[in-house]
């Protein structure tokens, strides 16, 4: 049974940083496409970032240059380093993994991912 668990969320002031972690059991991140999504209250969940073993990471325009997706292959932990945080970055952050092996095909599409974590809350105050 696959389980993804996010951690690392919290409350920070604008301009601060957080690093989110996503730990997997029953699933190997390096084998497939993995993504990050977020959802603000009253808003739809939106794509943030995705990566695969092609060495390519893609990012939403709203966070490009501020967030970095990385993978610790040995520990099988996916990270999202978030810098220069803004109040509009607040929300619940989710990691996700695709069951299809190989590179990302539809990284921005939620339905492309088969496994999801429960989310970790990020709150950025101005």
Image (cartoon, grey):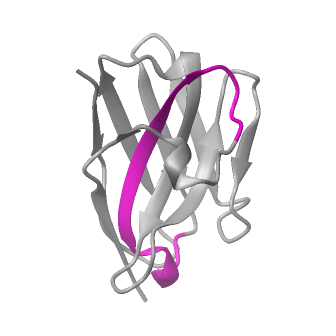
For residue 14, side relative to residue 53 (left or right): left
What is the quadrant of the C terminus in the image?
A: bottom left
Name the image quarter holding residue 61. Answer: bottom right
Image location of residue 45, percent across then percent down: 45, 68
Name the image quarter holding residue 24. Answer: top left
Q: Is residue 78 magenta?
A: no
Q: Which residues are magenta?
A: 85-105
Name the image quarter holding residue 48. Answer: bottom right
Residue sitting nearer the eye, 73 or 34: 34
Image location of residue 33, percent across then percent down: 59, 31
What is the quadrant of the N terminus in the image?
A: top left
Residue ID at (65%, 45%):
107
Image location of residue 19, percent across then percent down: 42, 48
Q: Is residue 101 magenta?
A: yes
**The residue positioned farthest toward the top in the image shown:** 74
Image location of residue 94, percent across then percent down: 38, 53
């Amino acid at each position: 049974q696959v389980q993804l668990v996010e951690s690392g969320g919290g409350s920070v002031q604008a301009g601060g940083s957080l690093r989110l972690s996503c730990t997997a059991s029953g699933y190997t991140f390096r084998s497939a496409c993995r993504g990050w999504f977020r959802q603000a209250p009253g808003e739809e969940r939106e794509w943030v970032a995705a990566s695969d073993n092609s060495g390519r990471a893609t990012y939403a325009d709203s966070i490009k240059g501020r967030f970095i997706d990385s993978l610790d292959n040995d520990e099988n932990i996916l990270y999202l380093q978030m810098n220069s945080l803004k109040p509009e970055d607040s929300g619940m952050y989710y990691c996700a993994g695709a069951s299809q092996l190989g590179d990302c095909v539809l990284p921005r599409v939620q339905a492309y991912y088969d496994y999801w974590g429960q989310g970790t809350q990020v709150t950025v105050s101005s």
